[in-house]
Amino acid sequence: MEKLRYSGIAGGIVYWLFVAWSIRGNGWFSFFHNALSDLGDPSKASSPWIYNYGLIVTSLFVLAFAIYLILSAKNKLQTVGGAYITISAIFLALIGVFHGGTRPHVFVSTYFFVQFFLGALIYGIGSEKGEVKYGSILIFLLALFGTVVHWPSVALEETYEIALVMAFTFLVAVKGGSKNV
């Protein structure tokens, strides 16, 4: 059970390793002009399966992290927050299935972030630990702020939001978990 506590951090690392691998084969990609999902669009990318399978593999780590949140929950709010993050893991896998260039792509990618940040907020509000409670609220507010900023590209906005996802997983792993679970 204790290993699940760090699965969110591991998932972030795995995701960026797949992104780096995918960028390596797609020299045209630019963080300043593209969306990360362009790396998974067969009409644009060489070997789009790398990025898309990377999303699916990463979703397993997010799911493991969500299971940790639910099993270590101290109250109903934390359980509900973990459940929202479970749903976000499903949407993350669906981003890999409905890759860039498919009709459902924007919906599943948007709802990954919506579900994750709502889950993080709800989980944090239920936390007895001030660092987790106020950190989760701050991360949620920063995520909202990120949606109103005029970004030069979708990839930069996505990177910002992914950094916040990783910040939450780090916060919970370091400050929020119960070592007795």
Image: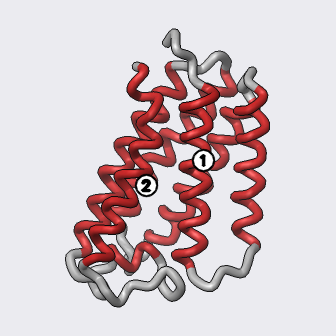
Q: Position of residue 162 (x, y in %)?
A: 54, 58
Q: Nearer the viewer, residue 44 or 180?
A: 180
Q: Nearer the viewer, residue 173 or 98?
A: 173
Residue 158 is tagged as: none
Residue 167 is tagged as: 1
Give the side of residue 63 with respect to residue 169, left or right. Answer: left
Q: Disc 2 marks which residue?
A: 92
* Whether residue 125 is situated above or below residue 32 in the rendered picture: above
Q: Amino acid at mark 2?
A: Leu
Quarter in which the N terminus is drawn? top left
Q: Nearer the viewer's eye, disc 1 or disc 2?
A: 1
Instruction: Give the residue at x 54% y 32%.
Output: 173
CB of mark 1 within 8 Å of CB of mark 2?
no
Q: Is residue 97 visible?
A: no
Disc 1/disc 2 C-alpha distance (Å): 17 Å
Q: Secondary structure at mark 1?
A: helix
Q: Position of residue 129 (x, y in %)?
A: 73, 24
- Choose top left, top right, bottom left or bottom right for residue 95: bottom left
Instruction: Give the residue at x 57% y 57%.
Output: 163
